[in-house]
Image (cartoon, helix red, strand yellow):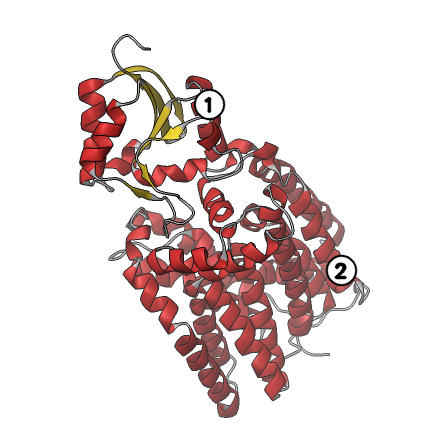
Amino acid sequence: MRPGATKGWQPPRHALAWAPFLLALALGLWGIRREGTVWQDEAITYEVARRSFPEIWQTLANIDAVHGFYYLIMHIFYMFGDGLLTLRLPSVMATAVAACGVALMGNKLAGPRVGILAGLVFPILPMVQRYAQEGRSYAMVCASVVWATYFLVLAVERPARNIWCGYALTSLVACLLHEFAILAVVAHGVTLFLAHVSRRILAAWVRTALFVSVAITPLLTLSVLQSDQVSWISPTRWGNLTAPLVLSAVAVCCARIPVEHRTTIASWQLALPLLILPAATLQAISFFKPLYVDRYVLFSQLGVALLLGVVLNWVWSVRGLRWGAGVITVTACAVTIMSTGVDLRKPGSRSDNATEVVEAAAELGRNGDGIVFIPASRRAWTLGPGSLEQNFSDVTLSGNLQTSDTLYGKEVAPGEIRNRMLSEERIVVLREPHREEAEETTREKAKRATLNRYFVECGSRTVGRAKVAIYARSGNC
């Protein structure tokens, strides 16, 4: 038995994969509809994924190429059904597959008890619970990174060509789903350096990393050209670094806990780079070019789960702490699920509840009213299930949204905007004030000028960051 190995209860082999998979699946299906509500980014997925392949391809040439591979995958899912379940089930399944991979990886690194504990902790983590139920790419990215990491561990112990091909393929899929997954590949390189692997293995990793990097170069190039779409991200401030620094310090302390080493790579050598490096890199860049959002590095939760698995395994091995710590652990998990978990499944858990905005507009407006979006990107609120198109006429939209090769449609010229608005007696206005200055154009100026000069505000309602207002020509409120 190697240093740090522990005796005692070991989970059944068949439970290693199935227990985490089933737990993740149960948590993902619990409240998956969120009372029929969607948030803005999910509404965009719903809209784009239901377009034809040529329409999606043309859209990606103009905007949102970073999510293009995900939209193509979701288009295939939407061939078999429509609605919220189709929108979110792929993320639920991806999270369950990721939990299975975490368990198998923990077993490979440090034994079956670490494996099953890490696998069970992973789907309970609040951040994982959140994105397991969202119609976006992040759960799929996370699952791909988890299995790429597992293939890496296998390749270090048995460097066969087919295993390295598995690592290359899963890494490439992760990066195509979201290009920042390349940071996980870089973290893998740090892991190999810390583990002092042979030059042969290091050379194989370098070849694989170069292959993935070259393969995603067109996507990176196109994403740079479309970088204006992330202009809403706030820059990193020194005050934002407190929580990450504390988490990193705690993680380093957890890494010092003794545990059985079953492979060349120690569990901490894998967990720490994945947990720290991707987030730290994006946060450092964001001092100059804001790019950091926590969901972009959801896969770092793999490191959290592995370290927690090691900690819980160590506690279990200390006879005097075993049962008390077990009760505390089970209680903590239950509290996390029943407090954070319940909140995450409420309609108001997301910062931008598009469904509530749509409902407010339907309540304030009348059938046949015109509708105007300020700025135009706020048309995203109406793209999900329960669109407003059947009730209101989109005053400023030029042509058809689905064939516009854009996410939010093309709008007519400023002069035509004014003329169309003046032909309406009442207009429902959906606006987000803090975006108006950032997305200022001559079209947006024409909308506001026309409203201010020829219309009066009859009433409004604030929904999160949105303001839904009714404007009418004098005497028509």
Q: Which residue is mark 2?
A: 18
Quadrant of residue 150 in the image? bottom right
**Mark 1 element type:** helix
Q: Which residue is mark 1?
A: 362
* Residue 219 horizontal side relative to residue 390, left or right: left
In the image as oriented, which residue stretches furthest toward the bottom? Answer: 200
Q: Are marks 1 and 2 in contact (CB under 8 Å)?
A: no
Residue 466 at x, y percent in the picture: 37, 30
CA–CA distance in space, label 1 to label 2: 45 Å
In the image as oriented, which residue stretches furthest toward the top? Answer: 475
- Identify residue type, mark 2: Trp
- Identify residue type, mark 1: Ala
Residue 63 at x, y percent in the picture: 35, 55
Residue 90 at x, y percent in the picture: 61, 54
How crowded pointer 2 is (Cα within 10 Å; few <14, some 14-19, many 20+) is rated as some
Q: Nearer the viewer, residue 457 or 149?
A: 457
Q: Nearer the viewer, residue 47 or 7?
A: 47
Residue at image coords 37%, 44%: 408
Q: Nearer the viewer, residue 201 or 64?
A: 64
How crowded pointer 1 is (Cα within 10 Å; few <14, some 14-19, many 20+) is rated as some
Up the image or down, 262 lies above or below 341; here it is below
> In this rendering, which labeled residue sits more in front, label 1 or label 2?
1
Residue 407 at x, y percent in the picture: 39, 48
